[in-house]
Amino acid sequence: MNNLFKFLILTFFFVCVSVHSGEVEVIARLSPAGTIEIKSDKLLGQLIVNKRSYRASKLFLDVSTLDSGVELRDQHIHKYLNNNGTSQVSLENIKIDRMKQTGTGRLHINGVKRKINFKVEKKENFLFTSFNINKKDYNLPKASYMGISVRPELELKIKIFPKDITKETSL
């Protein structure tokens, strides 16, 4: 009877949300001037929701889905982000406090994992976060072409559109 009670409590308080659509936008500022916006709407993963938090073991996207609007530049971006053979960028071990609207996770880029802290906004039908990273922290090489280079700091914007809410079935 005790195990049945635990199962009922867990299924009552926990909900599993598949993320079938999420968006990532990278803002790369250029030197001496300008910006490049790189986007993907192929963020995948699964969130566990309860009264106090959102959790996810991994949200990820394949770097080949990133699009800057210029095909040749996209090929360079895909190669640049895949320079160690890793074709995914991911945010792992995500914990979001729903009350404080803050989160932590480990951002995995180019074979390097680093802990990050971020603020989260709950919009009408999605969660939103924005934070900055430094390319050097992820061993990303200098990116430049004809005297124009990408500055070291990149801004990441992430939108998660939770869909397909189902009861959590695993204990």
Image: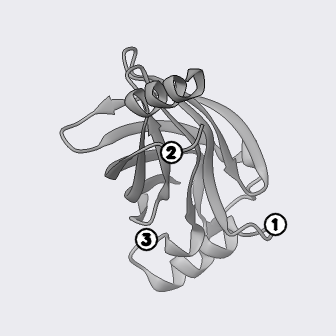
Amino acid type at image mark 3: Ser
- Element under label 1? loop
Residue 38 coordinates in the image, percent (x, y) = 44, 63
Q: Decide: marks 1, 3 in contact (CB < 8 A)?
A: no
Tell me the amino acid under the disc marked 1: Asn
Q: CA distance from mark 2 to mark 3?
A: 39 Å
Q: Are marks 2 and 1 in contact (CB under 8 Å)?
A: no
- Left or right: 92 with respect to 70? right
User: Crowding at label 1, few (<14), some or many (≥20) Cα neighbours within 10 Å?
Assistant: some
Task: Give the residue at the far bottom of this rendering.
Answer: 72
* Location of residue 3 in the rendering, given as x and y in whole percent from the top left corner: 59, 27
What residue is pinned by disc 3? 68
Q: CA distance from mark 1 to mark 3?
A: 21 Å
Q: Quadrant of the N terminus?
A: top right
Q: Which residue is depicted at the point 74% across and 66% down?
A: 86
Which residue is label 2 attached to? Answer: 169
Name the residue: 43% across, 80% down.
Answer: 70
Residue under numbered circle 1: 84
Of the two numbered discs 2 and 1 in the rendering, the one whose residue sits closer to the viewer: 2
